[in-house]
Image (cartoon, helix red, strand yellow):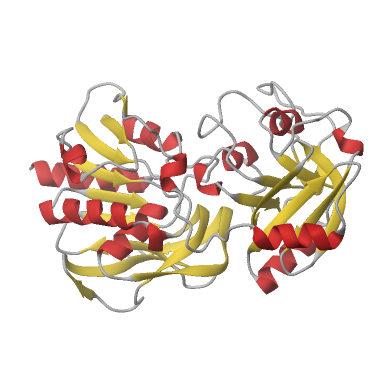
Amino acid sequence: MTTSTRGADKVPAVLVLEDGRIFRGRAYGAVGETFGEAVFSTGMTGYQETLTDPSYHRQVVVMTAPHVGNTGVNDEDAESKRIWVSGYVVRDPARVPSNWRSRRTLDEELAAQGVVGISGVDTRALTRHLRERGAMRVGIFSGNALPDEGTMLAEVRQAPEMQGADLSAEVATKEAYVVPAQGERKFTVAAVDLGIKGMTPYRMAERGIEVHVLPATATVDDVYAVNPDGVFFSNGPGDPATADHAVSVMRGVLERGTPLFGICFGNQILGRALGFGTYKLKYGHRGINQPVQDRTTGKVEVTAHNHGFAVDAPLDKVSDTPFGRAEVSHVCLNDNVVEGLQLLDKPAFSVQYHPEAAAGPHDAAYLFDRFVSLMEGQRA
């Protein structure tokens, strides 16, 4: 991948899907080539949080909103220290950003971080294609002397698939760090970083929680070395079927009965720890407008998602597991995909979506309060 950007918006670019479908446009961001899994995000805002979400590692994100980049890029909204997407696809990039916090344009930021993108693409047609055919490998090629179509397609088909990919350790912190509680410290939480977003420990810190963020390679002993009142398993990229280490650690936590909360990848890890299987969705859930019902209250929430895998658990019955009874607590109203699990005999629950509300909405913020209630109950 190269990072030449001078006059990039005039450089031709080609997007090649592994089934042979081709879209042509112009370079956006860095000029060069990149590969990944083609997925689409339905959010109309929040592109900076999407780009910096580690869960998007090795994915080429197609934005369904036609106009992207109008608020530029600021120094406050990033969810990690870098952009993680492998490539970026937009239809109509903003010519001039307009926002009081903007520090640079989106294409400048993509170029500075070496992210190859393409603009001028019919993203509606591309999204419809991915909905019908499913997420698949893709390549973006830009430059004034591009390979022939057959060569580009062959390169795309040689790229690794997402199914079977073990990626958490590639995006997680290498060293443990602490996010201090805001105000009085009420609880200590060990957070296993599988690709955590920066807003997640911040939301816990707001509630008086001191968060010890641990590497994905952390052991059960590492978790309990911080004397936690609760344990958290984060979001992250890759296939949960490969995450045997995280599953083993979670089972160790469940055996001790410590209050446990997981989101996204953490939900899939809990599913596996309880004995359920996981599977790849046809095209996944991504964006900030997905309707989910909390079955414990009947309330419908608009939620933020980024997952291409799901837990295979029965929707309408209580299941016996090695750690007691479990049930599906949340379900997606679009397609009945499992969006949450809870144990009935131990203080443990998880959701498949993102309650940290970065970039929104805020409907699911109560889940952090539910985690606090579990820790309060355990302490009492």
- Picture residue at 28% right of the left edge, 48% below the top: 370
Please state which of residues 160 and 6 is positioned toward the viewer in this rendering.
Answer: 160
Residue 354 to residue 208: above or below: below
* Screen quadrant of the C terminus: top left
Residue 244: image x %, image y %? 31, 58
Residue 181: image x %, image y %? 29, 25
Please state which of residues 127 and 239 is positioned toward the viewer in this rendering.
Answer: 239
Please state which of residues 329 and 201 is positioned toward the viewer in this rendering.
Answer: 201
Residue 375, can we see it?
yes
Residue 33: image x %, image y %? 75, 45
Q: On the picture, is 179 further left or further right than 94?
A: left
Image quadrant of residue 300? bottom left
Residue 285: image x %, image y %? 55, 60
- Picture residue at 87% right of the left edge, 54% below the top: 24
- Picture residue at 42% right of the left edge, 47% below the top: 168
Q: On the picture, is 311 further left or further right than 286?
A: left
